[in-house]
Image (cartoon, rainbow, N blue to C red):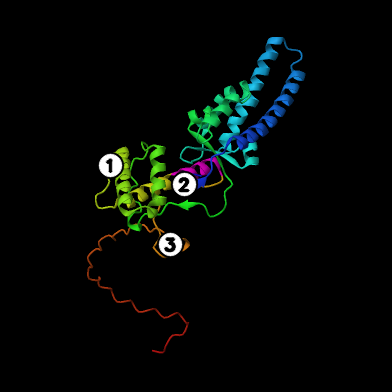
């Protein structure tokens, strides 16, 4: 049993896929790929019958590279390491630290797969998988990937403990780009097992890992924070950054979803988000009032004239 950790800081006990399951998955993928390739070749032969031999050979080579090399790379990239054969066998390609693969990983695996699977009929891949302790072929070694079993019983996953609440958001300015995946894996494995270790051994490991992590980030660890809490807080910060990046990519790919604001006002603690007060404009002081002057004298109103009635009083 080998413990891997995903990019979301979740420790998973997954078994690396061995040769029989991997060979079955590759066989299924090759059957599908060659079926598509034969269909494409027949279609090209019928459509390019009027062309010369050189053009037909060029189109054949292009179809071979597109269907048997480019298509597997595209499928593994878009599905994050799950081809049709791997889905049927319950396998997935992941990075060495358990995170999802990217295009460069799939490109290296696909390019070397042409040599060790297609050109040698899988002999080189079988030998490399038998020699490797985790059943990796040459493409996995050079790409830094691993094929693991994805179907595991429920309840075997162990999570990284969260840091103390007073450390939330303290390391938002930390530069984590220089921290290698191997160090992240060591930190996460320690955090999931530190309760099972001897206290002195656990403290020594935490101090060593905290020093290694601080040297990679270029910022010394705060002396007032315990090493284990520092490690948990930095791991949580990396998880938050990857989550924001993942949601930002989804928003960018979905034009109907409004963009995520870069900054927002935090809601009142304990209040429902929908009940949060709307931001109010800053109060503008009123202009100074003019001094009051005494009211001007109002002239007496003239007596109202009586309306003419046509009657003249006697003298």
Kindly report the secondary structure that dominates the magenta region of the rendered protein. Answer: helix
In the rendered structure, the answer to whether residue 247 lies left or right of residue 53 reads: left
Q: Is residue 253 magenta?
A: yes
Q: Element at badge 3?
A: loop
Residue that numbered label 2 is attached to: 8
* Cβ atoms at labels 2 and 1 below 8 Å apart: no
Please report the bounds of the magenta region as a residue range. Answer: 242-255
Ranked by sequence position, the earlier of labels 3 and 1 is: 1
Q: Quadrant of residue 166?
A: bottom left
Q: Is residue 12 above or below residue 142?
A: below
- Badge 2: how crowded within 10 Å, few (<14), some, or many (20+)? some
Q: Is residue 26 magenta?
A: no
Work out whether residue 274 or residue 4 is closer to the camera in this orientation and state it.
Answer: 4
Please state the horizontal and vertical placement of residue 139, each as a whole percent of the image.
Answer: 53, 28
Cα distance, mark 2 to mark 3? 30 Å
Please state the horizontal and vertical placement of residue 8, each as a whole percent of the image.
Answer: 46, 46
Residue that numbered label 1 is attached to: 219
Q: Quadrant of residue 123?
A: top right
Q: Is residue 126 above or below residue 181?
A: above
Ranked by sequence position, the earlier of labels 2 and 3 is: 2
- Viewport quadrant of the C terminus: bottom left
For the point 54% across and 28% down, the residue is 128
Between tags 3 and 1, which lies in front?
Answer: 1
Work out whether residue 227 or residue 163 is closer to the camera in this orientation and state it.
Answer: 227
Please state the horizontal and vertical placement of residue 50, each as a whole percent of the image.
Answer: 76, 13
Residue that numbered label 3 is attached to: 276
- Badge 1: how crowded within 10 Å, few (<14), some, or many (20+)? few
Residue 83, can we see it? no
Q: Element at badge 2?
A: loop
Ranked by sequence position, the earlier of labels 2 and 1 is: 2
Work out whether residue 32 or residue 290 is closer to the camera in this orientation and state it.
Answer: 32
């Amino acid at each position: 049993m080998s413990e891997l950790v995903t990019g979301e800081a979740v420790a998973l006990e997954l078994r690396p896929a061995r040769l029989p399951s991997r060979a079955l998955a590759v066989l299924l993928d090759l059957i599908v790929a060659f079926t598509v390739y034969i269909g494409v070749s027949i279609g090209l032969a019928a459509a390019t019958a009027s062309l010369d031999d050189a053009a037909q050979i060029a189109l054949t080579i292009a179809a071979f590279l597109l269907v048997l090399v480019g298509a597997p790379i595209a499928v593994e990239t878009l599905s994050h390491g799950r081809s049709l054969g791997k889905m049927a066998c319950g396998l997935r390609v992941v990075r060495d630290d358990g995170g999802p693969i990217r295009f460069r990983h799939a490109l290296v695996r696909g390019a070397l797969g042409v040599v060790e699977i297609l050109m040698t009929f899988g002999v080189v891949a079988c030998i490399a998988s038998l020699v490797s302790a985790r059943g990796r072929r040459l493409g996995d070694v050079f790409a830094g990937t691993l094929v693991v079993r994805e179907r595991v019983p429920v309840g075997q996953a162990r999570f990284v403990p969260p840091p103390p609440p007073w450390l939330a958001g303290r390391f938002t300015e930390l530069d984590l780009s220089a921290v290698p995946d191997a160090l992240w894996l060591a930190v996460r494995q320690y955090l999931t097992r530190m309760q099972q270790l001897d206290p002195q051994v656990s403290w020594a490991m935490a101090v060593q890992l905290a020093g290694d992590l601080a040297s990679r980030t270029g910022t010394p660890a705060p002396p007032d924070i315990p090493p284990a809490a520092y490690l948990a807080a930095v791991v949580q910060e990396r998880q938050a950054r990857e989550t924001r990046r993942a949601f930002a990519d989804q928003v960018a790919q979905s034009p109907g979803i409004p963009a995520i604001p870069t900054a927002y006002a935090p809601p009142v603690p304990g209040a429902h988000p929908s009940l949060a007060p709307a931001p109010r404009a800053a109060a503008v002081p009123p202009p100074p009032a003019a001094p009051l002057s005494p009211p001007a004298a109002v002239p007496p109103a003239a007596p109202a004239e009586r309306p003419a009635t046509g009657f003249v009083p006697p003298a």
